[in-house]
Image (cartoon, coloured by chain):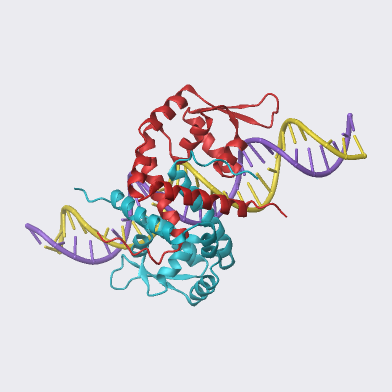
Chain colours: A red, B cyan, C purple, D yellow
Amino acid sequence: MSQPDMSGWATGRLLSTAARLAEHAWDAHLARWDLNHASFAVLHLLSGAPRSQRELAQAMQVEDQTMSRVLERLERHGHVGRARSTTDRRRVEVSLTPEGRTALTEAAADDAAEALLGEAAGDLPALRAQLIGMIGDLSARRWAPPD
Amino acid sequence: MSQPDMSGWATGRLLSTAARLAEHAWDAHLARWDLNHASFAVLHLLSGAPRSQRELAQAMQVEDQTMSRVLERLERHGHVGRARSTTDRRRVEVSLTPEGRTALTEAAADDAAEALLGEAAGDLPALRAQLIGMIGDLSARRWAPPD
DNA sequence: GTCGAATGGTCAGCACGCTGAACGTCATCT
DNA sequence: AGATGACGTTCAGCGTGCTGACCATTCGAC
């Protein structure tokens, strides 16, 4: 089957398409544990210590509202617990449940998706370096200080 | 402001984040014409000749249902017209309206987003080549023949 | 102490992606 | 011609992302 010619595509479209395909492959792998690309990354962030929702949102470069719903889903599936902080009752402390920790460990163990991307990308380290540089640049522009 | 350390991020997460940031910058530019990254790409595909919805979906590497709704929105804003084909009444022929063509021309004229990505990415041609290779590989796996 | 601003989360609503299921239309085979 | 299957589109529903608006809590200035 012939691939469409992508040489004329805008770079943004290439990025979105590649991201979608990567997410799809990853989600297929993570579905076993009722996880997906977003929630898995959150579990990973929580593996060290509990965090507030805003901390998680910032670490994921996502808006608070988005994180709120991802966590709602994670809680619904029993992967995390949420409890209002006792010292600051505005904050919600999010922590891994034992089930969440197990799921994280198992899902991270055979990371088929990362291996897949390794094959698909010619030079994975170079790609990662490019993406990291790009994210740094674009997110600095987006949340630029009102100078 | 210190960037979070992304060296530990999964590659899929890097891709998604970079794509989201690129889409955001692009959408901000296209909002003037009631367009966004998805609908703009569709207009571009239609600039040559009218197409059926399925053709558009395949060209965009997207499911039919998704394309259906993007087109519904484009029609609502007057950028495209949709008409049942006379030769095959299952098909819907999508064509640019004059307003759509004007919007496409204007939006494509000063493509601020592509320039932005050019700055953000160190080596844009290399990045594009990597992404194109990756999309080819991943989409072949996804829609692999039932061998 | 009180008032107002800043902070942390949530709700409502939109858009793009996906899956699964339905619908009308064509094409083919008998 | 009638049944069967393939095709093109849409509907229902979910998930992640966004924006804008709202609520409760805390902190600071007075």
Query: Closer to the camera, A31 or A12?
Result: A12
Which residue: 42% across, 73% down?
Answer: B47
The quadrant holding residue A109 is top left
Is residue A28 visible to us here?
no
Which residue: 53% across, 30% down?
Answer: A46
- Give the x, y percent position of residue B89: 31, 68
In this view, A2 is above or below B7: below
Identify the image quadrant of the N terminus of chain B.
top right
Which residue: 50% across, 51% down?
Answer: B18
- Give the x, y percent position of residue A137: 57, 53
- Give the x, y percent position of residue A106: 39, 28
- Give the x, y percent position of residue D9: 36, 61
Which residue: 69% across, 32% down?
Answer: A90
Is residue B61 visible to us here?
yes
In this view, A85 is above or below B140: above
Left or right of B88 on screen, residue B33: right
Query: Closer to the camera, B117 or B75?
Result: B117
In this view, B47 is above or below A117: below
Q: Residue furthest top?
A: A98
